[in-house]
Image (cartoon, rainbow, N blue to C red):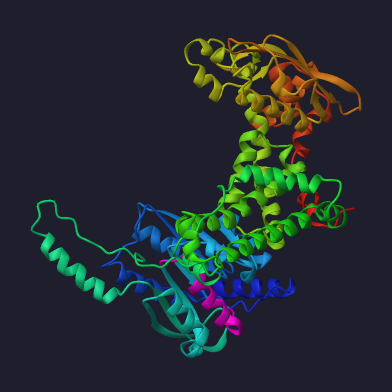
Amino acid sequence: MESRQMGNSTLAIVKELKGAAEDFEFYPTSESQMDLIADDLSKIMTTHEFSGKELKILDIGAGDGRVLKYFFNFFEESHPNTSIKLFAIEKSNVHIKSYRKNNISLLGTDFFSTNLISKNCDFAFTNPPYSIFSPWISALISQLNFKIMYAILPERWQSDEAIKEAIDKRQVTSAKIIAESDFLEADRKARAKVHLVRFAFNDFEKESTDAKNINEKLKASRHYSPYFPSIGYKATCPFQLFVENELNLKQTYSTTTAKFKSYKEVERIRDMLKGENGTSRELVESRGVLWALLENYSRDMEKVLTDYKKISEISPQLLMELGVEYKSIRDGVEEKLLGFRNVYWELLFEELDDLTSRLTHKNSVLILNTLKANSLDFTYENAVYMISYAVEYGNELIEDSLIHVFKNLTAETSILRHYKSNTHMYKDCWRYNSESANKFAKYVLDYRFVVSFGSNFSGGTLSKERQHDLNDIFVMLGLLGYASVSMEVHKSAIEPGKEYSVFGTDPEGKRIVLLKCRFYLNGNVHFKFDQKVMLRLNVTASRLLGWVRYKGDFFEETDMDIEDGVWDISDGMKIQANSVLAITYKAA
């Protein structure tokens, strides 16, 4: 019954893929094939082990993620104290859209546009399109940083010269056929005869014998702990091969210039995009910001490679006389090639105003770090995916952003009154257990109050923490429906004890003072909000926190009457992907 359901599910996926023109030779790996790989791994792990507390699993051409989910369960059982991370390279949007809910991180979309050298994993798997299996698998062997890799390949792989060359160049110790298989009984049938192949840097048979002999000697020790060789401990570095073979930089003597500083590169590229003249500005106006960033990224990467190739033309003797070291240039190449990727993701994130304007500083940093952590190459397809991902993730954080500000303003002095249903329970709670009150009390904030943040100023200016807090309040005001929120001075120019006003345009189009504030050296902050602003915050926070379900409930609990427009604010806070994805289109 289960296999029939799986088959029907696969047929539905294939139909959807064909409808979206995204079939890409999708022949799902069968459960029996996964079982064969798991059996081989189980035998290996009786004598060997994966080192480290984290195990990264990567499927290249991951499809619907079934292999990743299978081996997540396999390793979770065999490595219960190990953190298991799932990664995928996949082109089809039909498949990709299911990854986030399954905790699968996307490392690339189009295979041949993916910078494999920057990707690393412990366990890799691939079931490539058989029409292009040769360049596919030879690229993975040459460029991917893996410890062990399994592949499902057509029988003719054994005589493929490109694969042989890749195995030799990467110094892969073993390329072993662990089983023969086919797709005659698979969810999507095919007549192809295939091999299940294991690529590894270990000589497992010899190493297991050596380990057995070592353990025999160790048993006499009082604190005996068996020795297990690490899987992949002899793996060669693909980046080193790239430096030597593509840049022709052999280990003699060489150097690099100043260390790569991402913040300086961000400033340089930002200035180019905003400059009145030049090709970057023309691209922004003609094709949009994303294409301008892509063009600059391509140009920067090409320049790095060209510059370092020129160094290989300088004689080793001269480089030695200049006192330069090979390690420096190798590190320089790596810093620039991988560093530029993060620089351009950060610049793209700056352009997502519709999203970032709705997130607190903490949540903005969280999304940006996620963009960088996935090691995605900066390509058009990846940018479209990451923007959609950021919107989906951001929408989950938008409500959290407003709640964060509401709770950050909560103190004994800022509460106007508790809800009638819990007044007696919490009216004295601040005196004895403020943490409990923060967690469980239901209340509304007053429009004017004093809160203490501990420290407001650092080095004579408003501290970065307080500037972030103030910016979070600006975000909150925007979520409540106020436009063009601004202050009469820059946040860094705020002086102790002086009163400052925050202005904004209300829903009726009037320019008003939304709040006034004073920051003191003793850590106190005096806030005075417009009463309508505070009503909007109290109502919206109460709805988001689940304290009330209906407008009448809020009135019953607080004696505060509200209009429909105020009650409905939380319904329209989230952002539509299309409004942010506009950045990927040609400029209007």
Query: Residue 26, located in which quarter of the rendered image?
Result: bottom right
* In the image, residue 341 above or below residue 450: below
Magenta run includes residue 140 = yes
Task: Determine the residue positioned at 61% across, 22% down.
Answer: 463
* In the image, residue 319 above or below residue 177: above
Q: Which residue lies furthest to the left in this view?
A: 220
Front-lying residue, 268 or 471 = 268
Q: Position of residue 380 (x, y in %)?
A: 72, 61
Magenta run includes residue 421 = no
Q: Position of residue 423 (x, y in %)?
A: 60, 14
Query: Residue 215, located in which quarter of the rendered image?
Result: bottom left
Secondary structure mainly formed by the magenta segment: helix
For residue 435, say whether it is visible: yes
Task: Determine the residue positioned at 58% across, 60% down.
Answer: 107
How many numbered callouts?
Answer: 0
Q: Which residue lies furthest to the right in this view?
A: 509
* In the image, residue 147 above or below residue 494: below
Q: Position of residue 85 (x, y in %)?
A: 47, 56
The residue segment tinted magenta is: 129-147
Left or right: residue 427 versus residue 516 is: left
Task: Determine the residue positioned at 48% across, 89% down.
Answer: 155
Left or right: residue 586 versus residue 551 is: right
For residue 183, say whether it is visible: no
Front-lying residue, 350 or 581 = 350
Left or right: residue 532 versus residue 9 is: right
Front-lying residue, 340 or 221 = 340
* In the image, residue 304 above or below residue 523: below
Q: Where is residue 184 in the image (x, y as percent from the top left)?
A: 52, 87
Front-lying residue, 194 or 182 = 194
